[in-house]
Amino acid sequence: MTLTRQLLLMTAASVLLGLGTRWVQNDPPPLWGFPKPIELLQPRAAIAKPESVDPDSAFLPADQPYEVDFATTMGLYMKRKKASIHFMDARKPELYQAGHIPGALNVPVEQVEEYQAALDSIPKSDLVIAYCEGPECHDSHDLAAFLNSRGWKRVAVFVGGWAVWSEETDFIEKTE
């Protein structure tokens, strides 16, 4: 048997073994595109008027992140100083520097371990809202899951992300 044929057989066997393992674990792999992001919770109270949202009662500690839309995010942004709400931008530093939600902390999800000191400055009882480029970006989901796993239990994902924020408001900060 030639070396090429052996390599092809080993590759095929590895792929089949990997697919079989995921199938047995009831975790079929996506055949195209990205894996489905984590499931998000809805805030506790239905928020008819986002400006009247009470972050303490709407976002109780949970083992998975909440989902927030633009209106709710804007309401929380306006209350961020009174209610200890923190925004985290999961995008790459160059995108963050070009424009971000004012006061947001840049924590690129690929380099999250390098930002541990900054993360440690945020009390684990505070509400943290993660966002990334837009609805198709999953970095905010990954950052939120990471925060949840490290003890932050009041975490939300702004699903509209930077795309919606920059389109709907002029509250934009840039850094050099």
Image (cartoon, rainbow, N blue to C red):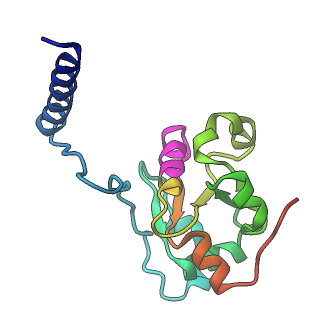
What is the quadrant of residue 15 in the picture? top left
For this rendering, which residue is in front, 136 or 68?
136
Q: Position of residue 75 (x, y in %)?
A: 63, 79
Magenta segment boundaries in residue numbering: 142-154
Q: Position of residue 72 (x, y in %)?
A: 56, 78
Q: Is residue 68 above or below residue 38?
A: below
Q: Residue at x 51, y 62 (%)?
A: 157
For this rendering, which residue is in front, 11 or 52?
11
Main SS, magenta region, reads: helix
For this rendering, which residue is in front, 25 or 96?
96
Question: Furthest-front residue in view?
Answer: 2
Is residue 146 found inside the magenta-colored segment of the image? yes
Q: Residue at x 68, y 46 (%)?
A: 123
| Screen quadrant of the C terminus | bottom right
Could you tell whether 117 is left or right of 130 in the image?
Answer: right
Q: Position of residue 163 (x, y in %)?
A: 59, 74
